[in-house]
Amino acid sequence: EKQGFSWDKYLKENAAKAAPASCFKQAATPPINEFNKGMKVEASDPRNHTSSCIATVIDMQGPRLRLRLDGSDDKNDFWRLVDSGDLHPVGFCEKNKGMLQPPLGFRMNSSSWPGFLQRTLNGATCAPDQCFKKEPSTPTRNMFQVGQKLEAVDRKNPALICPATIGAVNEDQIHVTFDGWRGAFDYWCRYDSRDIFPVGWCESSGHPLQSPGVKASSYKSLKVSRESNELSVNVSSGHSVSPSQASPLTPSSGEISQPSPHEST
Ligand code: MLZ
């Protein structure tokens, strides 16, 4: 029998529906990753989107690359899909009459940039053109609906993709809420963000998928019967907390916490 988290079972247990694949700016079939660790690419600086920098592939997970800007520290790594519009082969910028820029926070004196650039590219392995896949087209409008399930990058731990739910929709924005994590990791993003994926994407792309957290989702699902003075808490994951486990009425923080091995962030 298959180990670990199963969307099939989870959707049934929670009587939930997956957001249709057509809602997402993602390829119908996840792109193939032909990069290797150590290869160099041109990437737009995530902290300064107008500048093109040299980056090195530090790690990979399915079709996602962990990148580090050359000349930057190891605290600002970022992840991009192999079909990200933010990535280009080395030489792209020059072909388009642009200039490669030092990353924000370049660790040397800016006058040493030209020399640094030459040294960093000297003898480097630049990722060949065929590694870079065409960016998928953008859905014409926001078609997400509240309650739909998806897989989403945890932006506080961007190596991770986790089960999530559309918590709200506002014009071109969606609220991504992480199942079982009480809001600490939730974020708003555009409907065409590359950080969100249809249910099943991790499995079909060979990327690991986290299991939902084990915390009560929020007081939205807390039902209190004042008459009987009975407390019952329904957790989005389908578990329920008995009155003896839960704290008494009138919570102060607005959230319930269950002791769990996954408490830490
Ligand atoms: N630091 C946490 C990771 C939490 C991931 C949550 N993703 C929605 C832990 O230790 O478990």
Image (cartoon, grey):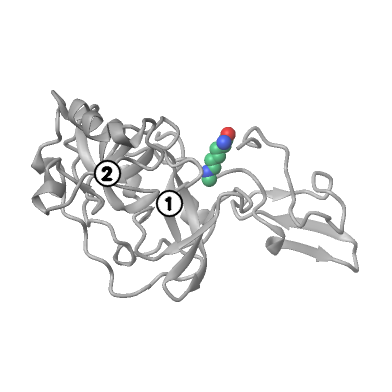
Amino acid marked by disc 1: Ala
Amino acid marked by disc 2: Gln
Q: Residue 85 sits in which quadrant? A: bottom left
In percent of width and height, residue 178 lies at: 53, 52
Earlier in the chain: of badge 2 and badge 1, it is: 2
Crowding near the residue tagged with mark 2, few <14, some 14–19, many ≥20 C-alpha atoms within 10 Å:
some
Q: Residue 263 vs residue 4: left or right? A: right
Q: Residue at x 72, y 43 (%)?
A: 258
Numbered circle sitting on residue 101: 2
Q: Secondary structure at mark 1?
A: strand
Which residue in the structure is indicated by mark 1? 152
Judging depth in this view, the residue of 257 and 98 nearest the camera is 98
Q: Residue 27 sits in which quadrant? A: bottom left
In percent of width and height, residue 235 lies at: 65, 54
Crowding near the residue tagged with mark 1, few <14, some 14–19, many ≥20 C-alpha atoms within 10 Å:
many
- Report if residue 68 is visible in the image: no
- Indicate if the residue with disc 1 has its beta carbon within 8 Å of ligand 1: no
